[in-house]
Image: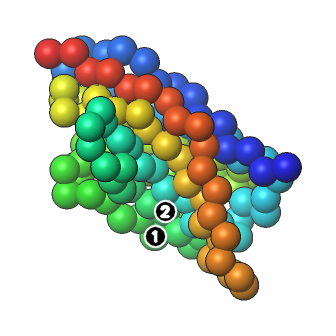
């Protein structure tokens, strides 16, 4: 059974930092690209950052220079370090795993709430 379990969300003041973690089980983690997405109330889910199997990264323009995605294949975990948080970063943050070899498959976590107060 595949599980992606996010943690690290919470309430933080503007300008503060949070580190999200997503622990994966039931997949060959090193075969998957990983990503963080977010969904604010009344808005569509949007990409925040992705990291490929080889470590290549991609960021939404809105978070460039403030957020950093990383992965630890030994721990089957992907991280999102979020600095200089803004109220507009408030959303539910979701972890996604996408298989990068063979047939396509994707998995989503259940999400973790991040609230940034002004």
Percent x, y for residue 15?
Answer: 19, 23
| Residue plotted at (41% across, 65% down) | 57
**Residue 115 horizontal side relative to residue 22, left or right:** left
Q: Is residue 101 visible?
A: yes
Q: Earlier in the sequence, mark 1 or mark 2?
A: 2
- The correct choice, above or below, for 110 with respect to 49 in the image is above
Give the residue at mark 1: 56
Percent x, y for residue 88?
Answer: 19, 33
Within 10 Å of disc 2 (Cα), the crowding (few <14, some 14-19, many 20+) is many
Give the residue at mark 2: 51
| Residue plotted at (23% across, 53% down) | 64
Q: What is the distance, in whole Å, between disc 1 and disc 2 at their CAs? A: 5 Å
Colouring? rainbow
- The correct choice, above or below, for 72 with respect to 54 in the image is above
| Residue plotted at (51% across, 26% down) | 8
**Residue 105 horizontal side relative to residue 67, left or right:** right
Q: Are marks 1 and 2 in contact (CB under 8 Å)?
A: yes
- The correct choice, above or below, for 107 with respect to 80 in the image is below
Asked whether 41 or 56 is in front, the reply is 41
SS at circle 1: loop
Asked whether 37 or 57 is in front, the reply is 37
Percent x, y for residue 53?
Answer: 60, 70
Q: How many marks?
A: 2
| Residue plotted at (29% across, 33% down) | 41
């Amino acid at each position: 059974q595949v599980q992606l379990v996010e943690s690290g969300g919470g309430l933080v003041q503007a300008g503060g930092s949070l580190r999200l973690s997503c622990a994966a089980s039931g997949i060959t983690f090193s075969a998957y690209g990983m990503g963080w997405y977010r969904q604010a109330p009344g808005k569509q889910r949007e990409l925040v950052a992705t990291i490929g199997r080889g470590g290549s990264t991609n960021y939404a323009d809105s978070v460039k220079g403030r957020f950093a995605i990383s992965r630890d294949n030994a721990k089957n975990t992907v991280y999102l370090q979020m600095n200089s948080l803004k109220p507009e970063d408030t959303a539910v943050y979701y972890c996604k795993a996408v298989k990068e070899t063979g047939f396509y498959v994707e998995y989503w976590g259940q999400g973790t709430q991040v609230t940034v107060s002004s």
